[in-house]
Image (cartoon, coloured by chain):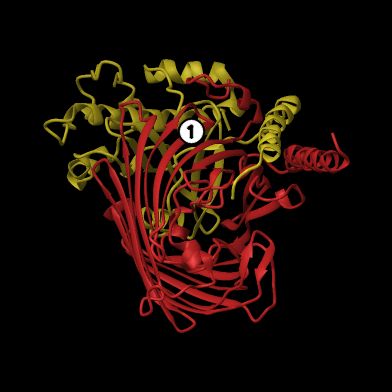
Amino acid sequence: MDNYMRKHLLSLMAVIVLILSFPHICSAEKAGSSLFYWEINLFQGYSRNDGWTGTGPNELKKSIGVEDYRRFSGDYGDWLVTDLQIRLTYNSNIGLNDALDLEIHNAYARFKLLYGRADIWVGHWEPAFGQEPQIDTYPDILETLYMKNIGFKQDWGIGVRGAFPWWDYKLTATNGSGMGIQFEGNYLFAGRIGIGDPSFDNYNLGFSALYGKTIDSMGKRLVSSDTPLKRRIGIDVSLFYGSFELRGEAVYGTEDEKDVAGTWARIYYFLTPDQKWRMDMQYQNWYHNLNKKGVVDSAAYAETSSAQVLGFSYKLNAPYLLRIYYAHDIEGRTGKEDDKVMFQLYYYYPDIRGITNLQSDYGGE
Amino acid sequence: MKMKNKDLFYNFLVIFLLFIAAGIFQVSTVWGAVGCALDDPDRDVRRFFPESTGYKTFFITIKERGGRPMADKIEEKLGDSFEPIYEHLEVEHPYYQVMKGKEHIGWVFGQNQKGEYGLIQVILATDLNGRILNFYYQRFSSPDASKFRQKLFTDRFRGVTLKDMEAYNPKTGEIKDPDSPLKKIKNPSQRNDIDFRATLRGIKKNLLLFHTFWKEGGQ
């Protein structure tokens, strides 16, 4: 074992120890108002064009992490909600020097105001645009149009959100930099109005808009300091019909002077009576530079593309979820096609001891 | 980007280390996996308690309150055994204690219940003693969902208590007490008896857990 590898393995073990000791630090807090989860995500994909790959379309990587969710109450009820979700990731697509990273997902404090009509949040959370804030695809292989529209899922900043009997709203003002905080002239304003209460109306129809300059980043690292001016409007729908869960989204806008547009639709369906097997289907299109098709664009993530995904999820037991997906991608500019097979093992559970138990009836005993 | 053999080796080494590290530490926590939380508690609590001014949220697991012995008692009273996906002992059951100023005026709580086609989420709004004031389905995966969600059906559960539900046997679908108000509640779907029985089981389980945690010294 060379020094280089030894150094990284020691770093890896050190961060794992840190994460594993996290529950003991938190356990001083009163039980009953907090939730704590372990998360392990193992992803492996195979692309016909690129061979084995360690990251998924949703920036999925091998990772171990924790989530700590708390509610704070007084005599009159809850007044504050906090959530911290961090993970140690290993990206096998890049050199060992950069392969390990500590990533932050949720890191926010939400102050409850006017009994949920104007909650204020501060921290790292979703900009208010489209479907992503409704469903949070963080651990999923299937992604929304968020990465195409914004380039990241969560951002540092502030926001206000409220819900009324038949409608809800969200407004955010964020840094426009994703996981890291940067000051390159970047900023992002976003808002969404939703109509319909999914619990009673079985649907939610959303109208969104965003405006801002965002930087191109990968995790906390700055990829490019270019800050194209983004304008977007979008419409999204969630529909619960019978045994189906249907979601879709359509967006249009500009990126500097270029037109962009995208569509996205997803269907879930449970296959077996025990509800362990679920079929997932998704179709996604993205058009960049609508008026000048064929022009080479430097922003690789923003190229015209189409992706069709069909897959199956299997709930092995309470902690474990297994996924296998097949995807067919078409790069619109070149017409280049690719087929991918993706595997995921996802563990999300309050007790890490469940990791060694693969029995189908395991439930924490 | 193609992965080299060396990278592939490190790749599997990391997976191995993650499992080994987690196995060695065997850390236990006091929290649990969240059960049937309200999608939007502010909106939902306000809907059923318009006079309310807030609520307090509690997360409770069977594991931390009584473990397997408590689960055995609940299963015996339920008349059925728990299933491992939705009803394991570490499920964090959320309870919303509804407040009007500093006064406690009611409860809202829910349960996940396996239906014929998918998940059924049974939400109850009750008075301080657990008498049902309102009942609704937050999720209902079924072609017959619209029939079950009609107010004509859900309103029939108003006033029902745990004592009423004790007459129901989830395994056989029978109601032992001929005077039980449950006798008057008919399946809204001509076809789907499984989801009707799942609904009754979900409500009985919901009330049982509430009474166990909050009324029988479990708190």
Q: Position of residue A241 (x, y in %)?
A: 24, 47
Few, some or many C-alpha atoms within 10 Å of disc 1 (few <14, some 14-19, many ≥20)?
Answer: some
Q: Is residue A102 left or right of residue A135?
A: right
In the foreground, B172 or B216: B172
Q: How many marks?
A: 1
Name the residue that disc number 1 marks. A322
Residue at position x 63%, y 69% from top? A177
Give the x, y percent position of residue A3: 88, 41
Q: Is residue A100 visible?
A: no
On the image, the x and y values in percent for residue B93 come to 50, 37
Q: Which chain has been coloured red in this picture?
A: A
Q: Is residue B1 above or below residue A258?
A: above
**As drawn, B48 above or below B152:** below
Q: Amino acid at mark 1?
A: Leu
In percent of width and height, residue B4 lies at 66, 41
B19 relative position to B206: left or right: right
Whether residue A363 appears in this view of the structure is: yes
Q: Quadrant of the C terminus of chain A?
A: top right
Q: Quadrant of residue A355?
A: top right
Which residue corresponds to the image point at 37% horizontal and 70% vertical from the top-left? A251
Question: Could you say which chain is coloured yellow in the image?
Answer: B
